Image: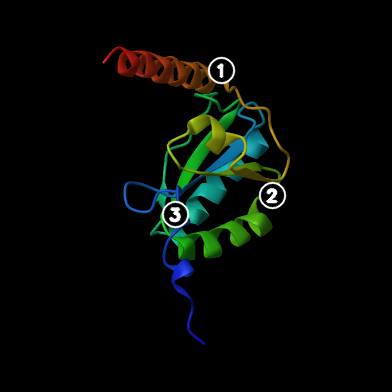
Amino acid sequence: MSLGKTYDSFVEPIRNDSGPGFDVHIYFHQDDEGEAKFAEGLRGRIMREFEELQTYKMHYKPIGPHPIGMFEVDIATPAQFGAFVPWLAIHHGPLSILVHTNTGDGFRDHTQNAMWIGEKLPLNLSSFKKSKEMDEVGLRLKALQNMQD
């Protein structure tokens, strides 16, 4: 049985060509030595078993919206998603995992278009809210300019 074309690309508006369709953030409490070591080991295993996935460095402190230490893995294709996310559901141990889309709307991607494996953590969404507010201001200004033309 052959697979349909929906297995070849992500549904719009998820990225297909301009970058990864999904980001996977793997969190660990940086002050917990055992958890940090587990995360380091998991990252190494991911790099060996999923060498086609882009795996980023460990961050040992909060960065951006991420409240604790983490590292990121990018998923570029539905096939990668189908293989990696179930594997991670089994092997994540004590770590929390955020899997989110990349559509160009960071706030929505990290909230409505997201799923968690393990414990859900509160994200620092303030930078996204500011960005979203600026986008709305820009749209209003553009509408005003169009009205004047």
- Measured as percent of width and height from the top left, residue 53 is found at 41, 55
In the picture shown, does residue 42 fall above or below 103? below
- Residue at mark 3 to residue at mark 1: CA–CA distance: 32 Å
Residue 108 screen position, x and y as percent: 55, 34
Name the residue nearer the viewer: 7 or 57: 7
In the displayed structure, does residue 99 sit left or right of residue 2? right
* Near-viewer residue (19 or 36): 19
What residue is pinned by disc 1?
126
Marked residue nearer the N-terminal end (2 or 1): 2
Residue assigned mark 3: 47
Q: Is residue 80 above or below residue 25?
A: below
Q: Are marks 3 and 2 in contact (CB under 8 Å)?
A: no
| Residue that lies at the very extreme toward the bottom in this rendered image | 1
Mark nearer the viewer, 2 or 1: 1
Label 1 Cα crowd, 10 Å radius (few <14 / some 14-19 / many 20+) = few
Report the label total: 3
Rendered residue at 45%/49% (across/down): 14
Who comes first in sequence, dot 3 or dot 1?
3
Looking at the image, which residue is at 47% across and 47% down?
73
Q: Residue furthest left?
A: 149
The kind of residue tagged 1 is Ser
Label 3: which secondary element: helix
Residue that mark 2 sits on: 93
